[in-house]
Image (cartoon, rainbow, N blue to C red):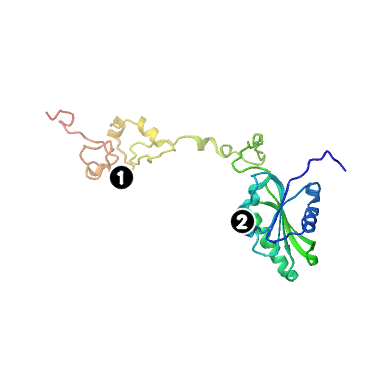
Amino acid sequence: MDTTKAQSSVLAFSDYTVLPVSMVINAVGELANEGAERCDPQVITQASSLSNLPVDSSSMDVVISISRSLQFPSDLLFGEISRVLKPGGTVLICKSLQSVAEETDKEILTLERKLLLAGFLETQGLQLKAVGLSGVVQSFGVKAKKPSWKIGSSFAIKKSTKGSVKVQIDDDLIDEDSLLTEDDLKKPQLPAGSTRKACKNCTCGRAEAEEKVKLGLTMDQLNNPQSACGNCGLGDAFRCSTCPYKGLPPFKLGEKVSLSGNFLAADI
């Protein structure tokens, strides 16, 4: 036997008035792989009336509860078990078998749920044999572990370094600009006398062309008037706001426009 191995601190409490030492030893034996084989357990009986355990916080490696009642330990004592256990410590809840197997499985699930709600991890149901006051007694139990971290503790999270995202370009993709011909790239020419205006968000070049066009009558327009809309010769009532013939008297398209003698004279 390794005498240098540290002795585990074990607390056993029960609702029994008298708790046989054999039941404690048997329960400790179930936890031999938890390092409880070398211990001097502290035993508390008649614990059903307790609301707290008379032990310092985080002072026990193992806590064992032995009872006959399914209502023991209470929710308060589950919290006390968590308090007195060291981080990473083990709890074992043992109960006498007083029902059929199906009901036993149900009670094991109930205990596991209570332990999980109390903050314990790695719950495991066990079928036990214990030597009690009336001989060999069939019993069951559930063991679990207290988390190794303390409430309020913090630690840094290591962020994994991710490489730059590589985008794979499909060689089968076609450049849309390569589908345009030279004629498609040419800006449309604004016809003389056109009354059509460029759109608000013009992208075809008409708006740019309109800025370059200077509205005014040329000799060709006077000698051989043409109209894109066909209304220029009908008079100002039918002409567009940008019509170069605005202000001139009505005329026939294709004939020379005659100006009155005072057309170019100032009104004032």
Residue 99 position in % (x across, y down): 73, 70
Q: Earlier in the sequence, mark 1 or mark 2?
A: 2
Pick the front one: 178 or 144: 144
Residue 252 seen in this snapshot? no
Q: Is 241 located above or below residue 54 in the figure?
A: above
Residue 30 position in % (x across, y down): 79, 55
- At a point 72% along the width and 60% down the height, the residue shown is 18
Element type at marker 1? loop
Question: Which of the image's four quarters has the N terminus?
Answer: top right
Pick the front one: 168 or 20: 20
Residue 50 position in % (x across, y down): 61, 56
- At a point 79% along the width and 65% down the height, the residue shown is 137
Question: Which of the image's four quarters has the C terminus?
Answer: top left
Q: Residue furthest bottom?
A: 100
Would residue 211 appear left or right of 152 to someone viewing this image? left
Identify residue for label 1: 230
Amino acid under label 1? Answer: Gly
Task: Kindly indicate the quadrant of the structure image that contains residue 5.
Answer: top right
Identify residue for label 2: 50
